[in-house]
């Protein structure tokens, strides 16, 4: 029986996006998941400076917060991002080693409230922060008419 | 004398990130398109697009529209807030950018995304951008 955490399995699996983000599971400490990432040339915004586009941080934070949600569910089921807010302090550089921390702030029924930080692995400088709201289980019976 | 008008978004859509997103401007004013690619999938079981891909596309569309409306400046995203209204299927995504205000140093825009019909939005977002000299 596989006893590895579902988050570890998620980041170890051959999910194409994880491979593109060069995302590797590092560990879970309490309710916080940490993943290492390296932004590749595909995400460059400015080829002269090597600045990475803010969209990379948005992608990374959504991925790692979603992975943390999966790691904390008792029974694995599909999840969907319902809301995502991001703040960008500095754009990472291409090839810069990064860490992404995702923390579960709490569950309420089928909603997970998450927060995340993308930091420079070497200095700990915060590059981006995020909060995310995730629905656990993507199908439910509608309670009223849908608009 | 013939003069050529350079699209201020040309540099933006030449960057690798835009190529990865397969994003491009549409003919309609303020509208952009993300051409579906297999690497945009976030949930392989239901073949839904990754929320971060839709978010990144909205951010790029916001920057592009600022480049059109505020020539000579370069916009960098400061923050974004996105609501995912529906599952985004494995097909193209379209975005319409509405400029709320362009101030001296900051710009505020709203972005609406849809797939089948503009009347059925799949996501909406608000972005704040810092304006820099190009």
Image: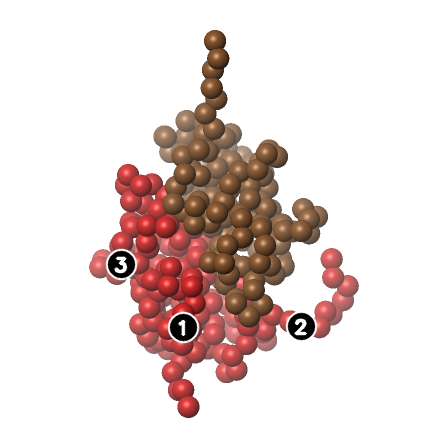
The chain displayed brown equals B
Asked where in the image residue A13 lies, by quadrant, the reply is bottom left
Of label 3 and label 1, which has the lower sequence position?
Answer: 1
Q: Residues within 10 Å of mark 1 (few under 14, many from 20)?
A: few
User: In the depicted view, which residue is nearer to us: A110 or B9?
Assistant: B9
Check if mark 3 and mark 2 are on a common chain. Answer: yes
Q: Earlier in the sequence, mark 3 or mark 2?
A: 3
Q: From the image, tell me which residue sits under label 3.
A: A97
Which of the 4 image quarters holds residue B106? Answer: top left
Looking at the image, residue A112 lies above or below residue B8:
below
Q: Which residue is mark 1?
A: A13
The chain ID associated with circle 1 is A
Q: Where in the figure is residue A56, as x and y percent of width and height?
A: 40, 53
Q: Which residue is mark 2?
A: A140
Please state the chain letter of the residue tagged with numbered disc 2 in the rendered image: A
Q: Is residue A115 visible?
A: no
Quote the CA–CA distance across marks 3 and 1: 21 Å
- Picture residue at 51% right of the left edge, 79% below the top: A76
Q: CA distance from mark 3 to mark 2?
A: 40 Å
């Amino acid at each position: 029986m596989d006893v590895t955490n579902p988050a570890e399995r998620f980041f170890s699996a051959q999910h194409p996006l994880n491979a593109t983000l060069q995302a590797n599971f590092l560990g879970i400490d309490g309710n916080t998941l940490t993943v290492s990432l390296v932004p590749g040339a595909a995400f460059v915004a400015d080829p002269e400076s090597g600045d990475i586009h803010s969209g990379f941080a948005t992608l990374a934070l959504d991925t790692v917060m979603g992975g943390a949600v999966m790691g904390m569910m008792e029974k694995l089921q599909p999840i969907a991002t319902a809301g995502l807010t991001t703040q960008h302090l500095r754009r990472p550089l291409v090839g810069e080693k990064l860490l992404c921390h995702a923390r579960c702030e709490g569950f309420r029924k089928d909603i997970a409230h998450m927060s995340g930080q993308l930091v420079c692995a070497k200095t700990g400088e915060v590059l981006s922060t995020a909060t995310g709201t995730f629905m656990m289980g993507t199908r439910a019976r509608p309670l009223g008419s849908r608009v | 004398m013939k003069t050529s008008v350079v699209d201020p978004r040309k540099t933006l859509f030449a960057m690798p990130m835009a190529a990865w997103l397969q994003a491009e401007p549409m003919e309609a004013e303020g509208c952009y398109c993300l051409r579906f690619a297999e690497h945009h999938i976030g949930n392989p079981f239901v073949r839904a697009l990754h929320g971060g891909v839709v978010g990144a596309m909205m951010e790029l569309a916001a920057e592009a529209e600022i480049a059109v409306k505020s020539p000579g400046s370069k916009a960098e995203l400061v923050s974004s807030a996105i609501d995912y209204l529906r599952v985004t299927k494995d097909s193209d995504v379209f975005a319409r950018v509405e400029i709320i205000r362009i101030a001296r140093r900051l710009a505020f825009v709203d972005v609406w995304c849809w797939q089948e019909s503009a009347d059925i939005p799949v996501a909406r977002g608000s972005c704040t951008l810092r304006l820099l000299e190009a």
